[in-house]
Image (spheres, rainbow, N blue to C red):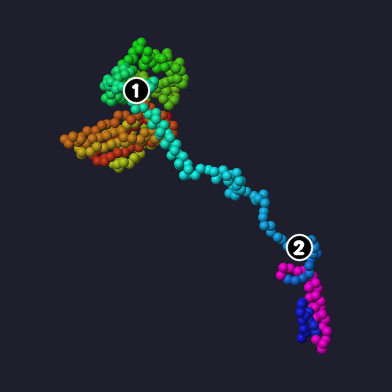
């Protein structure tokens, strides 16, 4: 087996060995790689030309640095927490008063002020110059609150009385009722208050038709017909209400023929608190009457209510109680009821449908509620 060289590990055949071409080539490759290898921080190698240029540019003794023993102050950069102090500033600070010295001076100043005050302090009234109205003698005191004297003093009682009077006066003048009563008492013709005027107009002038603002020249103000309801004209003729339809005046209360006039009544069912349909009609017409009557069957001690709901053209026009029966409210075995007045007497026109619901609004035992209606088909 061949030996290896010390530095790059080339193979050396022994003297008794035959030369091997592969071994020679391998040694050549190792030598070639080693020649191209450059030095690094951890391994030896050839130096690059750039490194050689840097090395040649270093001056002799370049690494022989000697740190100076002193530095000029100008090389220091100051900031808000690091400042130089000048000799003048140090002198000013050192000459400042100490707390103890300041207190001693303050004590001296205080004592001097006391001594001066004692030297000028008067000990009797005669020593005062009475040029500003000082009280030099005991003044008279009065309980009067109407005194105008400038030499008599008001007593505490007078002050209290004056305060109470002022407080009472304030309560009155801030009371709306008090002010109103005072104005009413003083107001009148020639008083100058004119509390009976509104923007300078008296009552009789305001209610005068000729003084109304924007009054219409005729009624109704929109120029329509005051005798129209839902587009139909009405009139009273021979003590009968008539409506104008189809070129003719027709009696509202007239029954007419059976094909045009619908009159009906229905007794409310016995299911309390539940509406049932009393009548329904799809078509157009004029509702002339709807109401409810009641009858009593016994004398139990309670009361019943009858209710109606009216729906015209799918709109609820009325929903509520229209009839009440009282059963023996006095406990004497006598019962009485209130029959409803007509719920609707004024004609109401409907275009597509009318539905009448009714019900007993409380316990219906012993009572009957009858819904009555009348309308004219068109």
Determine the secondary structure under disc 2: loop
Q: Position of residue 272 (x, y in %)?
A: 29, 41
Residue 255 position by quadrant = top left
From the image, tell me which residue sits under label 2.
Answer: 61
Confirm whether the magenta stretch covers residue 21.
yes
Depicted 266 relative to depicted 14: above or below: above
Give the residue at x 77% y 81%. Answer: 4
Residue 344 vs residue 74: left or right?
left
Label of residue 40 in the image: none
Give the residue at x 75% y 71%. Answer: 44
Q: Which residues are magenta?
A: 14-42
Using the image as rendered, state which of residue 270 and residue 28 is in the foreground.
Answer: 28
From the image, tell me which residue sits under label 1.
Answer: 126
Q: Position of residue 280 (x, y in %)?
A: 38, 36
Using the image as rendered, state which of residue 37 and residue 304 is in the foreground.
Answer: 37
Give the residue at x 40% y 14%. Answer: 201
- Determine contact: label 2, label 1, CB under 8 Å: no
Q: Earlier in the sequence, mark 2 or mark 1?
A: 2
Mark 2 or mark 1, whichever is nearer to me = 1
Residue 347 vs residue 101: left or right?
left
Using the image as rendered, state which of residue 84 and residue 226 is in the foreground.
Answer: 84
């Amino acid at each position: 087996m061949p030996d290896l060289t010390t530095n790059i590990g080339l193979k050396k055949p022994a003297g008794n060995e035959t030369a091997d071409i592969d071994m020679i080539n391998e040694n050549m490759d190792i030598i070639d790689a080693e020649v191209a290898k450059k030095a690094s921080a951890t391994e030896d190698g050839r130096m690059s030309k750039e490194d050689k240029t840097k090395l040649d540019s270093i001056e002799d003794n370049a690494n022989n640095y000697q740190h100076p023993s002193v530095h000029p102050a100008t090389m220091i950069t100051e900031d808000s927490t690091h400042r130089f102090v000048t000799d003048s500033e140090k002198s000013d600070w050192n000459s400042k008063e100490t707390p103890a010295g300041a207190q001693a001076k303050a004590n001296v100043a205080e004592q001097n002020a006391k001594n001066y005050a004692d030297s000028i302090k008067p000990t009797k009234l005669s020593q005062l110059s009475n040029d500003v109205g000082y009280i030099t003698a005991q003044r008279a005191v009065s309980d009067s609150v109407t005194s105008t004297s400038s030499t008599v003093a008001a007593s505490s009682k007078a002050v209290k009385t004056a305060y109470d009077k002022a407080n009472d006066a304030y309560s009155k003048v801030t009371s709306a009722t008090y002010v109103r009563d005072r104005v009413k008492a003083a107001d009148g013709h020639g008083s100058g208050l004119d509390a009976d005027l509104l923007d300078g107009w008296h009552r009789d002038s305001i209610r005068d038709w000729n003084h109304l603002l924007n009054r219409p020249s005729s009624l109704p103000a929109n120029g329509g017909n005051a005798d129209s309801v839902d587009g139909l004209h009405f009139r009273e003729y021979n003590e009968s209400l008539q409506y104008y339809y189809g070129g003719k005046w027709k009696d509202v209360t007239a029954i007419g023929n059976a094909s045009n006039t619908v009159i009906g009544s229905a007794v409310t069912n016995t299911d309390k608190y539940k509406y049932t349909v009393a009548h329904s009609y799809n078509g157009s017409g004029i509702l002339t009457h709807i109401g409810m009557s009641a009858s009593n069957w016994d004398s139990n001690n309670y009361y019943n209510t009858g209710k109606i709901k009216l729906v015209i053209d799918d709109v609820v026009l009325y929903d509520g109680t229209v009839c009440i029966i009282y059963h023996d409210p006095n406990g004497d075995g006598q019962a009485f009821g209130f029959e409803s007045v007509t719920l609707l007497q004024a004609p109401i026109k409907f275009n597509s449908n009318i539905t009448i619901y009714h019900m007993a609004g409380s316990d219906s035992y012993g009572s009957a509620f009858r819904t009555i209606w009348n309308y004219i088909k068109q």
